[in-house]
Image (tube, rainbow, N blue to C red):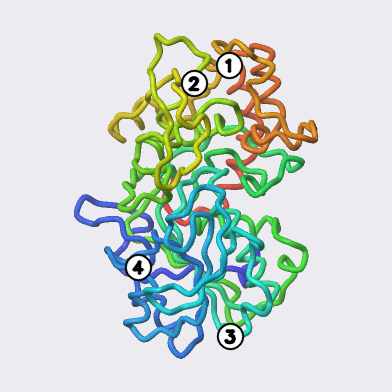
Amino acid sequence: MRNFLIICLISLVAQIAGAQTKNMPILPAAYRTEVYLPLLKGKKVGIFANHTATIGKTHLVDSLQKLGVNITIAFGPEHGFRGTADAGEKIDNYIDQATGIPVISLYGKKRRPSTEDLDNVDVLLFDIQDVGVRYYTFISSLQEYMEAAFENKKPLIILDRPNPNGFYVDGPVLDIKYKSFVGMQPVPVVYGMTIGEYAMMIVGEKWLTPKANNSKDTAFHFQIIKCANYTHQSKYILPIKPSPNLPDMSAIYLYGSTCYFEGTVFSEGRGTEHPFSIFGHPSLSNQLYAFTPISRDGAKEPKLKNQLCYGWNLYDDGNAVAKKLNNQINIDYLVKAYQLFPQKDSFFLRPKSGNVTDYFFNKLAGNNELREQLIAGKTSAEIKASWQPKLNEFKIIRKKYLLYKDF
């Protein structure tokens, strides 16, 4: 990786690299204003953020405005700049009422800033809480934002945040044939990197567009502002739910294991109190856990709305869920659900095209192999064993870009 591509700023003189102590709380990079405010002084700033971009309980944009930073434009991802939209809901551009800043949606008609959007920008800022699961679309938004910055020769500052699933690596590695917005790069479902480390990787491995990969350096190409006191052994508890359907640590820990149900006829728990901790279908035995998805904020039209479903409720205290998962994806839920489902030929949502690359389940899995393994009756152990060769290859790549002490 070329040195001019990445400059990592470290300002805590007394900090032992990545060490966390009981008396030193984990601080997202946004809190470290003394490091990055000098880079914004006198600049016209464009910011990609949502409701998780906070310093304490105050939105980053509000804090920066009070500190005299000139924010000329903001960009919002899936769920919107304020984080209230349904999953997949398309959002139009608007003026943010709280700040008066124009907000450009990058989860609707377009997914990256245009050259015109960046005309009145000197430097770009990125601050969003990721959850460390490949199909959580914020890392795709990050890539698009980075490509726009590099192609338009705009300096970029990424304010890093801890990864709540950053203490392990697991899952099938995406086959690039199944590339989509829910998986753009050959990484496993749980990749064990902060969003800053992930940004370093996609630059260092030249996974961006050719134009972005070959862009010439600016005053600085991009900078990662590190978190304080975080390591990959940390169990970081999110202070704010990152999106409407990841309301608690139970859902965040289970997300890598249960989101596959979005590609099936099963409810993944949207429309319940505990999405991604609850899943099931009306066709299963009524001896299982019963629930009914209903219209709720963030899930106005959930799958199987108002239908009585039977399945599983895995909701628990976050620490208990993490302990049960034992630093790995649990594929047992998916295997068992397929075994018990009576209409197996309709278990997977079928695309109109019928092409294997268009199955949403395959886009989530990153391959067609997992679907075929379930159909063939493979055990969880056999399925997980098939992931290991590519997982081992990814772990070698990952190591090159870590900013924090590893697990």
Side (left or right) of 210 relative to 241:
right
Mark 2, secondary structure of its residue: helix
Q: Residue at x 31, y 66 (%)?
A: 55
Q: Residue at x 47, y 54 (%)?
A: 85
Instruction: Specify whether residue 200 is in view.
Output: no
Q: CA distance from mark 2 to mark 3?
A: 50 Å
Query: Tag 1 or tag 3, which sits nearer the N-term?
Result: 3
Query: Residue flagged by tag 1: what amino acid is it?
Result: Tyr
- Report the disc number at residue 120: 3
Q: Residue at x 62, y 59 (%)?
A: 108
Query: Tag 1 or tag 4, which sits nearer the N-term?
Result: 4
Mark 4, secondary structure of its residue: strand
Q: CA distance from mark 1 to mark 2?
A: 9 Å
Query: Residue flagged by tag 2: what amino acid is it?
Result: Tyr
Q: CA distance from mark 3 to mark 1?
A: 53 Å
Counting from the top left corner in percent of width and height, residue 187 is at 62, 43
According to the picture, the residue beneath numbered tag 1 turns out to be: 338
Viewer-side residue, 397 vs 322: 322
Quadrant housing residue 208:
bottom right
According to the picture, the residue beneath numbered tag 2 turns out to be: 333
According to the picture, the residue beneath numbered tag 4 turns out to be: 59
